[in-house]
Image: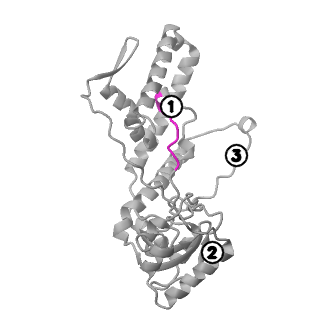
Amino acid sequence: MKSLQLLLCLTPVACLFSQTPPPPKPSVSLSTETPARATTPPPAKVPPDTVVLTVGDEKITAADLDHLIDMIPEQVRNQARTTGRRQFGDNVVRLKIMAQEARRRKLEDSQAFKDQLAFQGENLLAQMLYQNILASAKVDEATSQAYYDEHKSDYVQVKARHILIRFKGSPVPLRAGEKELTDEEALAKAQEIRKKLADGADFDALAKAESDDVGSGANGGDLGTFGHGRMVPAFEKVAFSMPVGQISDPVKSQFGYHIIKVETRQDKTYAEVRSDIEKKLQPEMAKKEVEALRAATPVVMDPAYFGPATPPPAAPSLGPGRTPIQPAPAPAPQPK
């Protein structure tokens, strides 16, 4: 929620992981989801009271460090506890050295420090209040059911296979021994394969022999089961609209021409997705509670100083809005 985002890093602790290098880019995949990364050995575990870091005269235990990690943004906590533990430790050392020197210079006695500390404290309280409101937000049955009824198409699941014929410029690697095809040649080959399938050829066998998506091709073109937002738009549009059991005409994407066969299509039930819906609606409910607090609190703003009031933005629909799918640069949709 933008209105409650911090204007500054709340404390140096909140910024401790800000310089961590971004994770490596995923390998190529038609799926819009990031592939699972290779697991790394877990770091060593030590008793909580073990001193793991000493900076000057200050000693920091494993429990102290873990508590610091609890205060950094959730999306980087796991990294700080595993592969980024050393990076996090280096940042703690930097913070402690500078804070110790600041105390030696008595900077904490300055009015500038006291003013910033007071402001940051209110920032922190505002954030903690929002998290408290969010955690306690309850979505009633009628609201979540109404959301499900309105967005039912979002919960359709498709099981499909495909055969991919790449063309020049595709991010899909060219198979060893295969000729680089122009767009026209790739379309002609896809149309030929489509005709063979219409005449009764086995989809599994043709996918293994002809598909340039070697990942799914080895499994007869099987892409597993996926929902909306998992595949690139051109592929998804056909997969969610064509009749079950039929073979599509060649469908063009940036990866090549796809021949798609949908094997099943089914809706997830309300019971299956209720918890997901509640998570989507909770931020909107929290936002409304914060807006109610603002409406109930007397506020006077001098228009000569602040300028005229700006009209409020259009009210968003319940739940986060959908965004255009940005496919990852990869060769084939991978099932979960």
Identify the image's colour scheme: rainbow, by chain, secondary structure or one colour. one colour
Q: CA distance from mark 2 to mark 1?
A: 51 Å
As for residue 22 lying within the magenta part, the answer is yes
Residue 189 placement (x, y as % from top left): 60, 79
First in sequence: mark 2 vs mark 1: 1
Q: Which residues are magenta?
A: 13-25
Label the magenta part by its dominant secondary structure. Answer: loop
| Front position in the image: 74 or 90 | 90
Mark nearer the viewer, 2 or 1: 2
First in sequence: mark 3 vs mark 1: 1
Task: Give the SS element for disc 2.
Answer: helix
User: Tags 3 and 2 in contact by the CB under 8 Å rule?
Assistant: no
Q: Which mark is residue 15?
A: 1
- Compared across the picture, whether 293 is left or right of 170 comes to left
Give the residue at mark 2. Answer: 186
Say which residue appears at 27% left-offset and 33% top-offset.
45
Q: Amino acid at mark 3?
A: Ala
Residue 140 placement (x, y as % from top left): 38, 62
Residue 258 placement (x, y as % from top left): 55, 74
Residue 19 placement (x, y as % from top left): 53, 33
Task: Give the SS element for disc 3.
Answer: loop
Give the residue at mark 3. Answer: 309
